[in-house]
């Protein structure tokens, strides 16, 4: 197999493999077991129960738990897939893994007509659908989606207008003497932050040719603008004290605290169901607005997250895995995922669903952003790109745009040529 992810992947590939399967397995009733490797999600038990009931013994869907951290999830999957583990039938992939896993031959493409609910652009919102395509073929079945929004505490904002741009956001935070909760730790979330700013400024991290090969893009003007915003935020009083180690859940907890000193937060929609569970009265104080613009008057290209479902290339249960996908992407299961986990459906038919809107009143805003969201580069080289961005931009407070810009270009260029130790 051609090496695509540098020294980290090489190390993982030779690491000991624990519990790799050697073939398909069946339930006590003789039905094929579909092993679904996916991170822990609150909606998992409900959708698995529903699909197993609907299967009527044709298959039995079981979740094989992965770590909660996305990087650790990927590491475990890479180890197993590189060893051609037959036990991996179905994979819950972060949207940015699709290109890498497809190029490595670890997941199999879907033939036209195999996906009943998420096989065409007419069925699926643009951002999620584009994330599932690689080299002209569909390798992922969009399961759910996600986008970051601007959250604010109504009681703290008062009569001040809701910021529309990053400059307005930081100006308002300074005026109010408050914090803006945003992720700054060295993780994938840092790449999400930078990519959204770069894309919103009119640039791209890489350009991907028709053969899937990535080349550094990073035009100077949009990249400098993105870096300037990150620098201003990180060195302002609005930045969280622990910005360099803060993750998305840290931001949620800080913003959710009753005595919070934060009027603003950039985060995924999972924060709203969390607030409702913690204190419904507190949740009423949550306001929500579009992801801040980088260029005033030009809508931002908000971050895109979520899961794509992939069928393991070495499974002996492909027909059963495909049947499970077609159940999981039905409207009933999509509705459960959205209302339970705060993660919007990928289906256009549910973009204005009353049951989802009752739980997620900001659904129209999310749907609008998902049509124009900025996917991270869909390329088999993605992991190297991600590691390079994290290495150069962390900590955010050390960003110096004139120096950081060439350093970022250089490291990504070397990483794509397998010349960098990341």
Image (cartoon, rainbow, N blue to C red):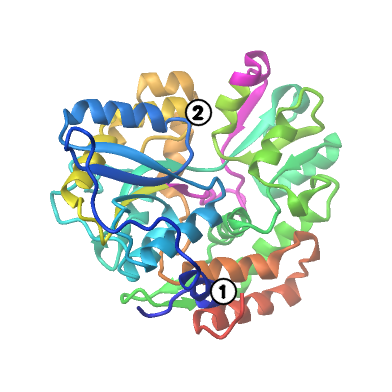
Q: Residue 182 lies in magenta, yes or no?
A: no
Is residue 353 toward the left or the right of residue 223 in the image?
Answer: left
What residue sits 68% from the left and 78% below the top? 407
| Mark toward the start of the polypeptide (2 vs 1) | 1
What residue sits 45% from the left and 18% below the top? 358
Q: Nearer the viewer, residue 204 or 6?
A: 6
Is residue 412 toward the left or the right of residue 169 in the image?
Answer: left
Most extreme residue toward the left, as rendered?
113
Q: Residue 282 lies in magenta, yes or no?
A: yes
Instruction: Tell me where the magenta segment starts and ends, as one range.
Output: 277-306
Q: CA distance from mark 2 to mark 1?
A: 34 Å
Packing grade of label 2 (10 A; few <14, some 14-19, many >=20) is: some
Is residue 175 toward the left or the right of residue 378 in the image?
Answer: right
Residue 379, image x and y in percent? 41, 68
Point out which mark residue 219 bears: 1
SS assignment at label 2: loop
Is residue 6 toward the left or the right of residue 186 in the image?
Answer: left
Q: In the figure, residue 72 lies in which quadrant?
A: bottom right
Q: Is residue 126 visible?
A: yes
Q: Nearest to the eye among marks 2 and 1: give it.
A: 2
Question: Which quadrant is home to the C terminus?
Answer: bottom right
What residue sits 82% from the left and 25% below the top? 259
User: Please, what is the dominant secondary structure of the magenta stretch?
Assistant: loop
Residue located beneath label 2 in the image: 362
Q: Nearer the viewer, residue 195 or 5?
A: 5
What residue sits 80% from the left and 60% below the top? 397
Residue 391, image x and y in percent? 67, 69
Q: Nearer the viewer, residue 42 or 110?
A: 42
Residue 130, image x and y in percent? 34, 55
Q: Is residue 182 above or below residue 187?
A: above
Residue 184, image x and y in percent? 71, 53
Q: In the figure, residue 387 lies in which quadrant?
A: bottom right
């Amino acid at each position: 197999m051609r090496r695509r992810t540098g020294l980290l992947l090489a190390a993982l590939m030779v690491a000991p493999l624990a519990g790799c399967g050697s073939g398909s397995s069946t339930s006590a009733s003789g039905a094929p077991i579909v092993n679904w490797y996916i991170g822990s999600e609150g909606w998992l038990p409900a959708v698995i129960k529903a699909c197993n009931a609907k299967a009527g013994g044709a298959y039995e869907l079981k979740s094989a738990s992965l770590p909660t951290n996305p990087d650790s999830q990927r590491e475990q999957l890479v180890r197993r897939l590189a060893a051609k583990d037959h036990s991996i039938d179905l994979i819950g992939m972060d949207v940015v893994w699709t290109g890498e896993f497809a190029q490595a031959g670890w997941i199999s493409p879907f033939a036209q007509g195999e996906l009943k609910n998420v096989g065409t652009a007419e069925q699926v919102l643009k951002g999620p659908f584009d994330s599932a395509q690689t080299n002209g073929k569909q390798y992922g079945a969009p399961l759910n989606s996600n986008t970051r929004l601007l959250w604010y505490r109504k009681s703290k904002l008062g009569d001040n207008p809701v910021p529309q741009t990053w400059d307005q956001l930081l100006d308002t935070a300074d005026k109010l003497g408050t914090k803006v909760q945003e992720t700054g730790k060295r993780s994938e979330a840092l790449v999400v932050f930078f990519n959204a700013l770069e894309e919103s400024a009119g640039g791209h991290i890489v350009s991907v040719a028709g053969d899937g090969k990535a080349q550094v893009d990073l035009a100077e003007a949009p990249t400098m603008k993105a870096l300037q915003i990150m620098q201003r935020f990180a060195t302002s009083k609005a930045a969280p004290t622990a910005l360099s180690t803060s993750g998305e859940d840290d931001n949620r907890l800080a913003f959710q605290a009753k005595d919070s000193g934060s009027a603003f937060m950039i985060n995924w929609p999972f924060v709203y169901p969390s607030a409702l569970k913690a204190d419904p009265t507190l949740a009423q104080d949550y306001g929500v607005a579009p992801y801040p613009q980088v260029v005033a008057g030009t809508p931002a290209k908000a971050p895109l997250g979520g899961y794509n479902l992939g069928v393991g290339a070495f499974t002996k249960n492909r027909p059963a895995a495909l049947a499970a996908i077609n159940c999981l992407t039905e409207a009933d299961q999509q509705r459960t995922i959205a209302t339970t986990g705060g993660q919007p459906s990928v289906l256009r038919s549910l973009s204005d669903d009353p049951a989802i809107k009752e739980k997620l009143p900001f659904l129209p805003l999310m749907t609008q952003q998902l049509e124009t969201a900025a996917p991270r580069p869909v390329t088999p080289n993605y992991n190297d790109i991600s590691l390079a961005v994290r290495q150069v931009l962390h900590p955010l407070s050390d960003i110096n745009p004139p120096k950081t810009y060439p350093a970022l270009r250089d490291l990504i260029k070397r990483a794509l040529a397998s010349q960098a130790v990341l």
